[in-house]
Image (spheres, grey):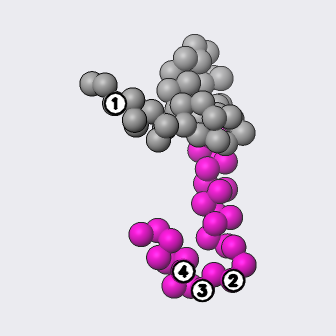
């Protein structure tokens, strides 16, 4: 299936991915390094979510609605 317009949806700007598509994990042959990179990516993205949830000035309703 050709879906070139969707390619940018899967690019990640975290420190681990550095703008690459998420498919770069599949190119890491060493299992330990692949697992480490995937973990670092996930951890960084979760930190981003946490920072978004705890931005100053947000109400509890803002935080709840940010998941919608
Ligand atoms: Zn990433």
Q: Is residue 34 left or right of residue 67?
A: right
Q: Nearer the viewer, mark 1 or mark 3?
A: 1
Name which of mark 1 and mark 2 comes first in the sequence. 1
Q: Are marks 4 and 1 in contact (CB under 8 Å)?
A: no
Question: Number of callouts in the render?
Answer: 4
Confirm or reject: label 1 Cβ below 8 Å from ligand 1: no
Indicate the quadrant where residue 4 lies: top left
**Residue at 68% across / 64% down in the picture?**
51
Spatial CA span between label 4 and label 1: 34 Å
- For the residue labelled by badge 3, is the local secondary structure a helix, a strand or a loop? loop
Residue numbers of the magenta segment: 39-68
Spatial CA span between label 2 and label 4: 9 Å
Q: Quadrant of the N terminus?
A: top left
**Residue at 50% across / 26% down in the picture?**
23
- For the residue labelled by badge 1, is the local secondary structure a helix, a strand or a loop? loop
Q: Are marks 3 and 4 in contact (CB under 8 Å)?
A: yes
Spatial CA span between label 2 and label 3: 6 Å
- For the residue labelled by badge 2, is the local secondary structure a helix, a strand or a loop? loop
Q: Are marks 2 and 4 in contact (CB under 8 Å)?
A: no
Mark 3 lies on residue: 59
Number of other residues with Cα within 10 Å of mark 4, as a class: few under 14, some 14 to 19, many 20 or more: few
Mark 1 lies on residue: 3
Spatial CA span between label 3 and label 4: 5 Å
Mark 4 lies on residue: 62
Answer above or below: position of 20 versus 62: above
Magenta stretch: residue 66 in it?
Answer: yes
């Amino acid at each position: 299936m050709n879906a070139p317009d969707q390619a940018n949806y899967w690019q990640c700007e975290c420190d681990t991915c550095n703008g690459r598509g998420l498919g770069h994990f599949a190119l890491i042959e060493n299992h330990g390094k692949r697992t480490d990179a995937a973990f670092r990516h996930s951890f960084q993205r979760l930190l981003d979510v946490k920072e978004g949830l705890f931005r100053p000035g947000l109400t509890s309703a803002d935080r709840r609605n940010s998941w919608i």
